[in-house]
Amino acid sequence: MTTVIDGKQVAASVIDAVKAASQTLQDETGIKTGLAVVIVGNDPASHAYVSAKSRMAKECGFTSVQHTLPEETTQEELAALVQTLNADESLHGILVQLPLPKHLKSEPIIQSILPEKDVDGLHVVNAGKVATGDLDGGLVSCTPAGAMVFVRRTHGEDLSGLNAVVIGRSNLFGKPMAQLLLAANATVTIAHSRTKDLPAVCHGADILVAAVGRPQMVKADWVKPGATVIDVGINRIAAPERGEGRFRLVGDVAFAECAEVAEVITPVPGGVGPMTIAMLMANTVIAAYRKAGKKAPKF
Ligand code: GUN
């Protein structure tokens, strides 16, 4: 029987652990965990994500601060806000929602967040710590951290002897995911658009992670029987069966056919997606514990 991972349920269990950890920190030290979320401009999808993050932070018992800046905000104004948030002792995490409006450069903004408050895990210091295997010192970016929760709950902490293939080599996901799998002793291949015979490479994977942004690209005959398949893609495709002009979300994996071959598989939606916010909350409470000089919980 194939197990379809319920990302909402796993995310809820992480959130329960975050709530307990933030309550313990407050009881023991009087410190309330604080998260600042910054959004610039009017993109409706970004506003929906940011509202969900701010709401979840409140639900976790955090101080939740949202800064909503107008589209015409300048680079200097945004940089100045980040400096203010860096200096605010009551805030342990800062997230600047991406993408920024076109006239703003995101990279200098992200790199100006103090690494210890970079709960997105996007600062080069945090990326570097993941790359060097220092997983307890930095903050791991949320989507790969969430995908690793599924991997650990399926295979345990030690992936010795297992082959993992990550399709996609982005700095945001593919590279850190591969590094996390490697740190857990998997034998890791990063595949990408220039890989020769991608189906054959994928067929060697005990753990197959797809993050390419191509709807339903991974087919059943790419999947090793009994493999764990983690789908990080979120693609909107036309769904005329739902009515004219309607869409539905699919992953990078052809779910129904791959579910017949895999032993464990994540759906889209409802797989990796819900984990991203949960791991953001986890990173924020981890940052608060470290600031208080206490050993941070693991999620
Ligand atoms: N936009 C879409 N996903 C994310 C994310 O995880 N972090 C940030 N900062 N922006 C995003």
Image (cartoon, rainbow, N blue to C red):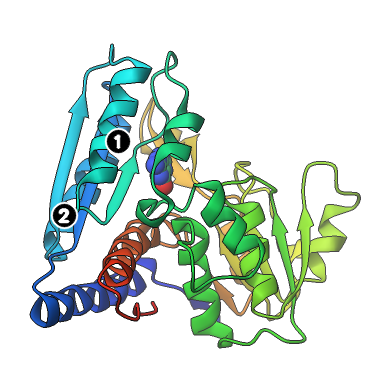
Q: Are marks 2 and 1 in contact (CB under 8 Å)?
A: no
Check the picture and name the quadrant holding the C terminus: bottom left
**Could you say which is closer to the camera, residue 254 or residue 8?**
8
Task: Give percent across and percent down for residue 174.
Answer: 64, 53
Q: Which mark is residue 90?
A: 2
Task: Give percent across and percent down for residue 201.
Answer: 84, 62
Left or right of 247 on screen, residue 39: left
Residue underneath mark 1: 83
Left or right of 114 on screen, residue 29: left
Q: Is residue 266 visible?
A: no
Badge 2 marks a residue whose secondary structure is loop
The mark that comes first in sequence, 2 or 1, is: 1
Query: In the figure, 200 relative to 194: above or below?
Result: below
Query: In the figure, 4 relative to 131: above or below?
Result: below
Q: Quadrant of ligand 1?
A: top left
**Could you say which is closer to the camera, residue 154 or residue 293?**
293
Task: Give percent across and percent down for residue 213.
Answer: 60, 42
Check the picture and name the quadrant holding the N terminus: bottom right
Q: Is residue 94 visible?
A: yes
Left or right of 220 on screen, residue 274: left
- Badge 2 crowding class, 10 Å Cα cut-off, few under 14, some 14 to 19, many 20 or more, is some
Distance from disc 2 to disc 1, alpha carbons, whole Å, reads 14 Å
Q: Residue at x 16, y 54 (%)?
A: 90
Mark 1 belongs to which amino acid?
Answer: Gln
**Could you say which is closer to the camera, residue 85 or residue 213?**
85
Q: Residue at x 19, y 53 (%)?
A: 89
Badge 1 marks a residue whose secondary structure is helix
Q: Residue at x 70, y 72 (%)?
A: 182
Q: Which mark is residue 104?
A: none
Task: Give percent across and percent down for residue 252.
Answer: 60, 50
Mark 2 belongs to which amino acid?
Answer: Ser
Left or right of 287 on screen, residue 144: right
